[in-house]
Image (tube, rainbow, N blue to C red):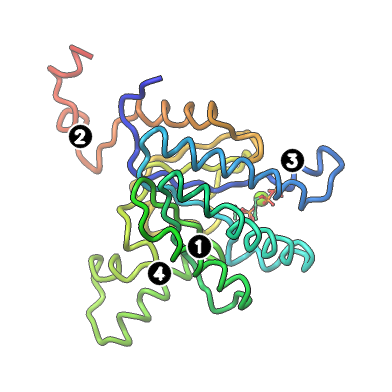
């Protein structure tokens, strides 16, 4: 399958793990485990399709409010996955970046993240940002605090450079699975001009075909960035299309 226009940067709110498990009379953590399989497949498929940056929302600033057992399972799952998946990510040329507030995480999780980042630092095919203990508001506030501490003026450009995702361009496509139509504090600054795509599939069911549907939907959109349609796609080009 060839797709006309592949987004450079895809960002995903991986939602619906809990419902996937509950519908099968399984504990919620079983859904998170299954969600990890979906994520592995998604990373691989993004690389194959030529996506250059994949950013996923794995744990939000607000997810601390879940039952403590679920929070600790999510921490354990992340630590185990980082240790397990790095060799395959190296084969696929995937570079991991952790995005979020590390300060509240345990020493074990922090060490796992640092090791995974170091072990994949030489890879160039796909940048894989894992947003963990991340919130869009946290990011804007920490960027502003950094500038204030340095005595720098606050402008759009300086804030942009101080954000946790300053190493990549803004997302072109933001996907949310699980049927909800909200951002839940994800990429509030960076998604200003992203195309939004909502899928009713629960995250563990979001497979390569579902990702291709999202990519095809994106390819058919006209991104105007404030301009008119005629400016972006000259009428002559439209007649040919
Ligand atoms: C998303 O799935 C994963 C995390 C938030 C960690 P949920 O756990 O939110 O699944 P639902 O929304 O309850 O189905
Ligand atoms: C968003 O999902 C966070 C992640 C996917 C990590 P939630 O399930 O936490 O979002 P809300 O609370 O339903 O908005
Ligand atoms: Mg949810």
Q: Quadrant of residue 206?
A: top right
From the image, state whether disc 3 or disc 1 is nearer to you. 1
Q: Which residue is mark 2?
A: 228
Circles 2 and 3: CB distance less than 8 Å?
A: no
Element type where label 2 sits in the image: loop
| Residue 74, percent from left and from top | 69, 60
The span from disc 2 to disc 3 (Cα, nearest Å) is 42 Å
97 versus 173 height, above or below: below
Secondary element under disc 4, as helix, strand or loop, is helix
**Location of residue 200 in the rendering, given as x and y in whole percent from the top left corner:** 62, 34
Classify 88 as above or below 197: below
Location of the C terminus by quadrant is top left
Q: Is ligand 1 within 8 Å of the beta carbon of the residue shown at mark 3?
A: yes
For image coordinates 16% across by 19% down, the residue present is: 237
Question: Which residue in the rendered view is the most extreme toward the top?
Answer: 240
Q: Earlier in the sequence, mark 3 or mark 1?
A: 3
Q: Residue 158, relative to residue 174: is it above or below?
A: below
For the residues carrying marks 2 and 4, which lies nearer the camera in this image? Answer: 4
Q: How far apart, in angstroms, are the residues tagged by discs 3 and 1?
A: 28 Å
Quickly name the residue at label 1.
116
């Amino acid at each position: 399958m060839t797709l006309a226009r592949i987004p450079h940067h895809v960002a995903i709110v991986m939602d619906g793990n809990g419902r996937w498990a509950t519908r099968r009379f399984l504990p919620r953590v079983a859904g998170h485990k299954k969600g990890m399989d979906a994520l592995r497949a998604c990373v691989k498929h993004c690389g194959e399709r030529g996506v250059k940056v994949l950013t996923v929302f794995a744990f939000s600033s607000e997810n601390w409010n879940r039952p403590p057992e679920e929070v600790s399972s999510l921490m354990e799952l992340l630590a185990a996955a980082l240790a397990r998946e790095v060799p395959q990510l190296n084969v696929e040329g995937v570079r991991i970046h952790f995005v979020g507030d590390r300060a509240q995480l345990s020493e074990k999780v922090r060490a796992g993240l640092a090791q995974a980042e170091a072990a994949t630092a030489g890879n160039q095919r796909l940048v894989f940002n894992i947003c963990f203990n991340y919130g869009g508001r946290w990011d804007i506030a920490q960027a502003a605090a950094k500038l204030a501490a340095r005595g720098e003026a606050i402008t759009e450009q300086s804030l942009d450079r101080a954000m946790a995702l300053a190493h990549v361009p803004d997302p072109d496509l933001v996907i949310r699975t699980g049927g909800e139509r909200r951002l839940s504090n994800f990429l509030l600054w960076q998604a200003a001009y992203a195309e939004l795509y909502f899928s009713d599939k629960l995250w563990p069911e979001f497979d390569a075909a579902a990702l291709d549907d999202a990519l095809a939907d994106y390819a058919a959109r006209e991104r105007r960035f404030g301009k008119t349609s005629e400016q972006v796609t000259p009428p002559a080009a439209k007649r040919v299309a």
